[in-house]
């Protein structure tokens, strides 16, 4: 059943059609089955780490097939009637795989599949008993819920759950949760909430171990902190936005296409706010032409750039050209 569901999902993604109803549920149906004693858990953990390193450097959806195949394999391990000594470790692996899969599903616009994958990640993390992981799947899901334009109430609930489970213990997931709150406050134009939540985020970040070599999805790095600051300052027309953007950009490697492109779009908004309207529009258009990759929130950012335009500039040919990208991202 699971292999058939995996084939249906892969075929649908390849054909650009909707994932068949029930396929995602079938894919994760082994979570409640009896657990066996899997071999090679360290290899599985390394695999999750590797996925986390590359998920932001490849075109959206590139990892879906491999992730699905690995989730099927983990599901088969879950069904082995043997010792349950490795149950917690296996659940951690499944949570990590499901979380990265949810990110990739969201980036290709498969919102329901992303939602179901995040639910599976939360279920697995809770079963693992790993508090930091439980916080991470909720904090990261809160961020991604914002970028896939789910209701603010959903973002707020996920972030609050993460913060509640963390109970003051600093972790990457707790930082993700506060970052999600920053995005919502900035989108609403709530300057006071932006400032206070950024302070919360910085306090958490200051207490995190900073391993510059850890590029996994379960890490929170300075680049992400500066990205959140840049986002908040850009949409609140903060005069520090340009400096913040340059700082954030300098922290991302050249192959981090999605965050660098999104920062470039914010730069276009800053230029428009500085009355460099034509130059800002052209910067945004060039940015979109140079990075064809889809990612969650890209259309949202383009719309926000257009929203910064004064009324008489929204009919400019360049504005119409940029608007065309909102239906193609």
Image: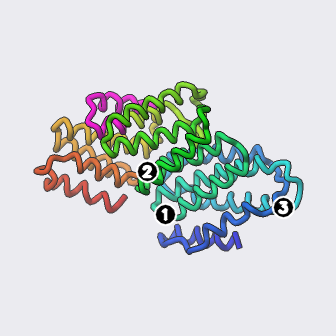
How many other residues sit within 10 Å of disc 3, few (<14), some (14-19) or many (≥20)?
A: some
Q: Secondary structure at mark 3?
A: loop
Q: Earlier in the sequence, mark 3 or mark 2?
A: 3
Q: Which mark is residue 110?
A: 1
Residue 268 makes an appearance in the image? yes
292 left or right of 137 in image: left
Picture residue at 26% right of the left edge, 29% below the top? 239
- Image coordinates of residue 126 in percent, x first then y, are 68, 50
Residue 294 makes an appearance in the image? no
- Image coordinates of residue 300 in percent, x first then y, are 34, 53
Q: Nearer the viewer, residue 164 or 109?
A: 164
Segment tinted magenta in the rendering: 231-251
How many other residues sit within 10 Å of disc 1, few (<14), some (14-19) or many (≥20)?
A: some
Total number of numbered labels? Answer: 3
Question: Alpha carbon of mark 1 to alpha carbon of mark 2: how far?
Answer: 14 Å
Q: Earlier in the sequence, mark 1 or mark 2?
A: 1
Vertical placement of residue 91 versus 167, above or below: below
Picture residue at 75% right of the left edge, 46% below the top? 43
Q: Secondary structure at mark 2?
A: helix
Q: Is residue 190 magenta?
A: no
66 left or right of 232 in image: right
Question: Alpha carbon of mark 3 to alpha carbon of mark 2: how far?
Answer: 38 Å
How many other residues sit within 10 Å of disc 2, few (<14), some (14-19) or many (≥20)?
A: many
| Residue topped by disc 2 | 146
Picture residue at 63% right of the left edge, 68% below the top? 25
- Image coordinates of residue 304 in percent, x first then y, are 29, 49
Q: Secondary structure at mark 1?
A: loop
| Residue topped by disc 3 | 80
Question: Alpha carbon of mark 3 to alpha carbon of mark 1: how far?
Answer: 31 Å
């Amino acid at each position: 059943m699971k292999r058939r569901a995996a084939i249906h999902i892969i075929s649908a993604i390849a054909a650009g059609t909707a994932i068949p109803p029930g396929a995602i549920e079938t894919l994760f149906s082994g979570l409640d089955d009896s657990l066996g004693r899997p071999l090679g858990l360290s290899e599985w953990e390394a695999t999750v780490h590797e996925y986390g390193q590359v998920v932001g450097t490849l075109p959206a959806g590139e990892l879906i097939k491999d992730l699905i195949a690995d989730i099927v394999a983990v599901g088969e391990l879950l069904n082995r009637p043997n010792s349950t000594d490795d149950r917690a470790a296996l659940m951690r692996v499944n949570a990590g795989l499901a979380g990265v899969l949810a990110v990739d599903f969201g980036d290709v616009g498969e919102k329901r599949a992303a939602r179901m994958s995040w639910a599976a990640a939360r279920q697995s993390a809770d079963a693992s008993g790993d508090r930091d992981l439980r916080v991470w799947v909720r904090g990261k899901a809160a961020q991604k819920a914002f970028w896939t334009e789910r209701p603010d109430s959903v973002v707020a609930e996920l972030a609050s759950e993460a913060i509640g489970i963390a109970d003051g213990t600093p972790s990457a997931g707790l930082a993700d949760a506060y970052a999600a709150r920053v995005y919502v406050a900035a989108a609403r134009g709530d300057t006071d909430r932006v400032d206070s939540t950024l302070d919360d985020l910085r306090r958490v970040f200051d207490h995190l171990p900073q391993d510059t070599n850890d590029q996994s999805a379960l890490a929170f790095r300075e680049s992400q902190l500066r990205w959140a600051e840049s986002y908040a300052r850009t949409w609140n027309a903060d005069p520090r936005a340009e400096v913040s953007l340059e700082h954030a950009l300098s922290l991302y490697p050249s192959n981090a296409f999605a965050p660098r492109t999104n920062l470039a779009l914010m730069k276009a908004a800053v230029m428009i706010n500085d009355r460099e309207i034509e130059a800002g529009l052209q910067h945004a258009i060039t940015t979109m032409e140079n990075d064809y990759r889809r990612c969650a929130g890209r259309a949202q950012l383009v719309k926000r750039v257009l929203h910064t335009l004064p009324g008489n500039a929204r009919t400019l040919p360049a504005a119409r050209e940029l608007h065309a990208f909102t239906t193609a991202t």
